[in-house]
Image (tube, rainbow, N blue to C red):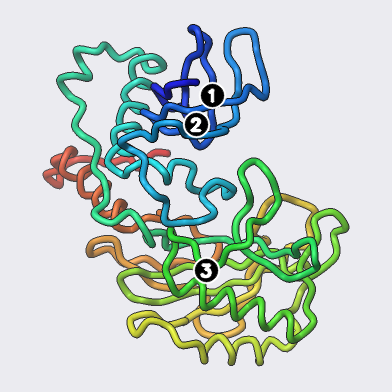
Amino acid sequence: MVTIEDMGSDGEGIGKFQGYPIFVKDAVIGDVAEVKIVKAKKNYAYGRLEKVLTPSSFRVTPKCAFHKQCGGCQIQALSYEKQLEWKENKVRNNLLRIGGIPKEVLDEVMEPIVGMEYPYHFRNKAQYPVGTDRNGKLITGFYAGRTHSIVANTDCYLGPVENKVILEYVLAFMEKSFIPAYDEQTGKGLVRHVLIRTGFTTGEIMVCVVINGNSLPQSKEFVDGLLGLELNLNRHITSISISPNTKNTNVIMGDSVKTLWGNSYIVDYIGDTKFRISPLSFYQVNPAQTEKLYGLALEYANLTGKETVWDLY
């Protein structure tokens, strides 16, 4: 029996048995759990969560049924308020231990974390790998944690709800047109990934199919089908493209993009600033928090218009 007292950098629970730290995936702070040691080191061990004996008061029912397998939402079973507290402490401890900033300085200058009003359906970009399951059925979703095994799921709670409609159409089109998914082991097959980007302010949607080749069969029919989808009234597809990537690589996008229909970009805004976003562009994935982040940076900078500003990364 182990009481989970803390969480590690990857969201795993940390408890102690007779002073011996154990890292336990899927356990959250406050859980009292039955844990099986699966890998023992000299100073710590990794354990598997066998049974939650007494659930933490911070434990919640995750919205997504795939949160344990998928590599994207490791702490969905923890209440959002506690997630924010954990993230704030994580930054604070890094500033203390790694940054060497004195505690009294942090106590004076560090402000509370700024969270979201609704922490779901906020991502404006998602890249979905395409493959087949054990029965040869076409699937898409996300990679399981630390693997390249696809967890079949078109209904991710982080992305816009329209993504599900688009992905299911892509899979149906591939099946009907006998278009194979790419196989990493053999290097054969055509469709590798589907990239979907959404302008939350403008409602513009981009669909880009990454392919192991230079063309998509029956591309006009593919485009017509996408444009015929029933989406949210405020959302509409304005850019459809392919990105050839024939390299044996983990890099998702190819070096180039060929527009099949519409614009080669979508438009979105952060505050009053207008952005053109291509399939290969970098753009912050959480627009609501980006606006808060940039707004706070400007507030802290307290610019008068006479300064020289360097944007460094």
Q: In the rendered image, which residue does mark 3 sit on?
A: 196
Q: In the rendered image, which residue does mark 2 sit on?
A: 12
Q: Nearer the viewer, residue 189 or 311?
A: 189
Which disc, if any, is residue 23? 1
**Could you tell which of marks 1 and 3 lies nearer the N-terminus?**
1
- Which quadrant of the figure contains the C terminus? top left
How far, Cα to Cα, is label 1 from label 3?
A: 35 Å
Give the SS element for disc 1.
strand
**Could you tell which of marks 3 and 2 lies nearer the N-terminus?**
2
Q: Amino acid at mark 2?
A: Glu
Mark whose residue sits in front, 1 or 3:
1
Question: How far from the left and from the top, in percent, is residue 306?
Answer: 15, 43
Left or right of residue 202: residue 257:
right
Quarter location, residue 44: top right
Which disc, if any, is residue 75? none
How far, Cα to Cα, is label 3 from label 2?
A: 30 Å
Mark 1 touches mark 2? (CB < 8 Å)? yes
